[in-house]
Amino acid sequence: MQPFEHDRQVQETITRDVVMAFMQFWAAQDVAETTALLAPDCFSVVYLDESAGGMAGKKSGRVEIADGLYSNLATWHYLQFDWTVIGVEHNTGRAQVAFEYQHQKTHLRYAGTMRMIFVVTDGMISRVECHHDEPRIVSFMKLVAEAEARLLESK
């Protein structure tokens, strides 16, 4: 085995282990353990308009990312969060997630899939990206806003 090949295999093992740990901790909704895997200057982007709340948009650093994760948990009940690592190449890992969330105030449910891409540097996640079906989520969030308005009117 060539030294370069060995280095690549070592990096891919580290990347897979870190991504798997992240997914396990987040599936358990453990924000502290999830964010402990992030580099202090980690960058996160969830490709959704920030009006979707929670982790939508761009976040920088552990504290801001943790705040977004806590916001997600305050807004949604996680009914399903099934994940699998679908590939690792050097320091980049990819995961697929099937999920179902229930909005805590309106009890509306949303099910879908997302793709997550992680960059692991020096054994920590330095970047994470989440790709959703944005038009579908935007439509769903309009339903949530309408349901919340009806709830306020009924009080």
Image (cartoon, rainbow, N blue to C red):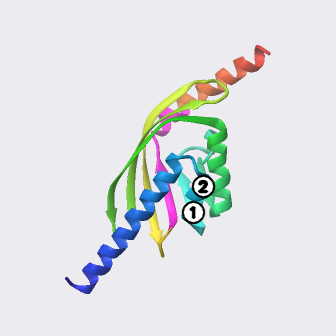
Vertical comparison of 8 with 65: above or below = below
Can residue 150 be seen at all in this image of the molecule?
yes
Residue designated by label 2: 58
At label 2, the amino acid type is: Lys
**Residue 86, percent across and down?**
32, 53
In the displayed structure image, the side of residue 51 where residue 46 appears, left or right: left
Crowding at mark 1 (Cα within 10 Å: few <14, some 14-19, many 20+): many
Vertical comparison of 90 with 34: above or below = below
Work out whether residue 137 or residue 36 is closer to the camera in this orientation and state it: 36
Q: What is the quadrant of residue 114 in the picture? A: top left
Work out whether residue 134 or residue 148 is closer to the camera in this orientation and state it: 148
In this picture, which residue range is highlighted in magenta?
A: 125-138
Asked which secondary structure carries label 1, the reply is: strand
Q: Which residue is drawn at 60% across and 28% down?
A: 142
At label 1, the amino acid type is: Phe
> From this viewpoint, which residue is outermost toward the left?
1
Vertical comparison of 114 with 4: above or below = above
Q: What is the quadrant of residue 78 in the picture? A: top right
**Residue 1, percent across and down?**
19, 82
Crowding at mark 2 (Cα within 10 Å: few <14, some 14-19, many 20+): some
Calculate the distance from the C-alpha at mark 1 to the C-alpha at mark 2: 7 Å
Magenta run includes residue 120: no
Q: Are marks 1 and 2 in contact (CB under 8 Å)?
A: yes
**Residue 82, percent across and down?**
41, 42
